[in-house]
Image (cartoon, grey):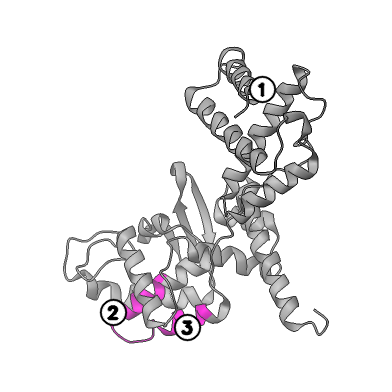
Amino acid sequence: MNENLEACLYAFMEYIQIERNYSEYTVKFYRQDIEHFYLFMNEQGITELGNVEYFDARLYLTTLFEKEYSRPSLARKISSLRSFYKFLMREQIVKENPFVFLSQAKRQLKIPKFFYEEEMEKLFQACEGDSALDVRNLALLEILYATGIRVSECASIQLKDINLEFDTILVRGKGKKERIVLFGDFANKALCNYIDHSRHKLMKNKDNHEYLFVNFRGTPLTERGIRYILNDLINKAALTGKMHPHMLRHTFATHLLNHGADLRTVQELLGHENLSSTQIYTHVTKEHLRKTYLSHHPRA
């Protein structure tokens, strides 16, 4: 590293430590990011910070992509260099900031995994059977898919929370907030069959309790127990991978939006406090539309 580059780095480190009062952890990463860029400058034969142009900044970003840096790491490096050059301009060491017009690498949006409608049919088929456990599993799957409730919310449902006349369930969500969720005819039929014919068989004269879903011992079904059942259904349906606890919740929201439901309604049904939490599902539905278009349009 030549003396000029080293002096600029030292001055910037002093600035962010003393004037900006950045933490030791933040200062460490600023130094690493700038030193990494210095290596790139050396590879490109650039000896002065003032000689770095927008094209060089773009080339540096491209090399980071090629080396498969994560999106958050890319964003941090570009942000560090933008701040560094802003400081250099303030000190009149350089005239321009080549990173100011460089689009910051946005954090990669993780699109929720969900089941397609054909996959849901296979899961329901995997519940077919007359045993008490089969009947319970069908009711469990129908309720999770019909309501979009969390696994934790499902495990806490009690018989008194269910209104079979109006097809509603009183759910206790995060922060002990209560909301009413709806379910349809398929879930109603499965639930009635389970309550009338199977739940008491599984209870096996255990101390009577009000929890809706029970395990083979007759005790309340836990979140872990529900996840085990769902993963077992995955295997029976010959679907790949494991079922994340939220996949049926994601599926519920995605299918509603795909069939024309508005975002506000889905927000209320999911129990989201902020609409921004629900908006991620619009990315799922857009991706679904894109794939459908590419698969079916003759000029796609």
Asked whether disc 3 touches disc 2, contact meaning CB atoms under 8 Å apart, the reply is no
In the rendered image, residue 109, in percent from the top left (x then y), is placed at 61, 54
Sequence-first tag of 1 and 3: 1
Q: Is residue 163 above or below residue 39?
A: below
Is residue 74 visible in this depiction of the protein?
yes
Dot 2: few (<14), some (14–19), or many (≥20) neighbours within 10 Å?
some
Magenta range:
119-140
Instruction: In the rendered structure, find residue 132 and report the number of the disc placed on it.
Output: 2
Q: Secondary structure at mark 2?
A: helix
The kind of residue on which mark 3 rests is Lys
Sequence-first tag of 2 and 1: 1
- Magenta stretch contains residue 136: yes
Q: Is residue 19 left or right of residue 93?
A: left
Residue identified by numbered label 3: 122
Residue identified by numbered label 1: 4
At 64% from the left edge and 39% from the top edge, which residue is drawn? 42
Q: Is residue 16 above or below residue 53?
A: above
In the rendered image, residue 103, in percent from the top left (x then y), is placed at 74, 44
